[in-house]
Image (spheres, grey):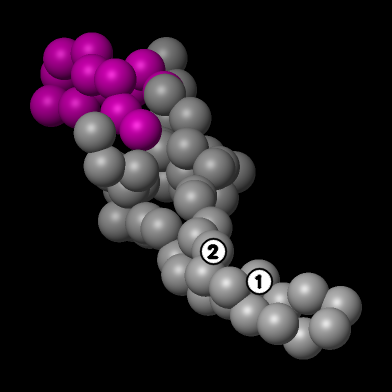
């Protein structure tokens, strides 16, 4: 399963972790996904949805 929001397609972001001495290394940020039961086309479906979409009301949980 890819860590991607089913509503807005938000996925993993990449960047650098920077230490106090300014040495850089790779790191990744994953979206905050929750499993939400919702109704799509009249049937119950479980979607992986980011918390931003849940808060903004783009998905209605059952």
Q: Is residue 36 above or below residue 7?
A: above
Check residue 43 for magenta coloring. yes
Quadrant in the picture for the C terminus? top left
Q: Residue at x 77, y 86 (%)?
A: 22
Q: For mark 2, what is the residue?
A: 27
Mark 2: few, some, or many residues within 10 Å (few <14, many ≥20)? few
Q: Kindly state the secondary structure of the residue where label 2 is placed.
A: strand
Q: Nearer the viewer, residue 9 or 58?
A: 9
- In percent of width and height, residue 43 lies at 16, 15
Q: Residue at x 35, y 43 (%)?
A: 3
Q: Quadrant of residue 44?
A: top left
Mark drawn on residue 5: none
As measured in the structure, the alpha-carbon distance from the residue carrying label 2 to the one carrying label 1 is 6 Å
The stretch in magenta equals 36-48
Q: Residue at x 64, y 80 (%)?
A: 24
Q: Is residue 41 above or below residue 11?
A: above
Q: Nearer the viewer, residue 46 or 32?
A: 32
Q: Residue at x 32, y 47 (%)?
A: 4
Residue 57 visible, this orientation: no
Overall secondary structure of the magenta stretch?
A: strand
Residue 14 visible, this orientation: yes
Drawn side of residue 33 relative to residue 39, left or right = right
Pointers 2 and 1 in contact (C-beta within 8 Å): yes
Q: For mark 1, what is the residue?
A: 17
Q: Kindly state the secondary structure of the residue where label 1 is placed.
A: strand
Q: Residue furthest right?
A: 20
Q: Nearer the viewer, residue 3 or 46?
A: 3
Check residue 55 for magenta coloring. no
């Amino acid at each position: 399963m890819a860590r991607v929001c089913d509503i807005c397609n938000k996925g993993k972001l990449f960047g650098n972790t920077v230490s106090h001495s300014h040495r850089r290394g790779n790191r990744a940020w994953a979206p905050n996904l929750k499993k939400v039961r919702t109704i799509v086309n009249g049937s119950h479906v479980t979607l992986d949805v980011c918390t931003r979409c849940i808060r903004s009301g783009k998905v209605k949980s059952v």
